[in-house]
Amino acid sequence: MSEIADALNFKVIGISFEDFQLNPPQLGAILVAMFDATAKINSALRPNKTCVFLKTTSASDSMIGHARPTASELIAVVSGWNRFLFLAKTMLLAARIEAESLIIRSTNETDWQKGLKEASLIICDSLTAKKLQPAQQVRVFKLIAESSLDELKQVMND
């Protein structure tokens, strides 16, 4: 939601799938969901409604233009979304970053900022980046592919 709001400068409201089924959005609302929810959402859509399904950014695309952390650097992964934490950790381990070099923090926990000052790099989502100090070395991993944001802009202009 944060990425969409930042990219489009538009009011964004999130609802769970269950709430979507109980209280369909107002007329004029643009429905948006992640691509992996296509079958689930399409089965619940009214005949006259459509949904924009967002594709995610690839891990390799997100690393273009960024130097690989050295083996001695401490890397923090921070988010309030557990799936983000899991995916980021998995990608870093697959990229041969040692598990001992990682700090994983959920913003849903007390003292989530503990140890972040020691990290040479903080990888986070766009919403979490807004909670961090500007002086910290933050790399925002955007989840939504640029092509999907372009598609959403087009739908809004139609």
Image: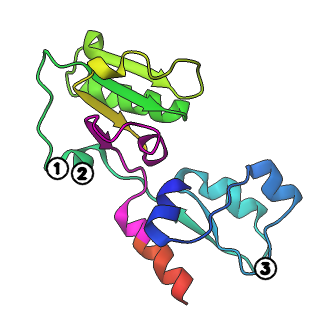
**Disc 1 target residue:** 64
Where residue 99 appears, x then y in whole percent? 29, 13
**Image quadrant for the C terminus?**
bottom right
Which sits earlier in the primary sequence, circle 2 or circle 3?
3
For marks 2 and 1, give the CA distance. Answer: 6 Å
For discs 2 and 3, the disc positioned in front in the rendered view? 3
For marks 3 and 1, give the CA distance. Answer: 40 Å
The stretch in magenta equals 126-149
Seen at 44% across and 58% down, the residue is 55
| Residue closest to the eye, 123 or 130 | 130
Q: Secondary structure at mark 2?
A: helix
Cβ atoms at labels 2 and 3 below 8 Å apart: no
Which amino acid type corresponds to the residue marked 3 in the rendered image?
Leu
Indicate whether 37 appears above or below 103: below
**Disc 2 target residue:** 61
Cβ atoms at labels 3 and 1 below 8 Å apart: no
Q: How does the figure colour the protein chain or chains?
A: rainbow
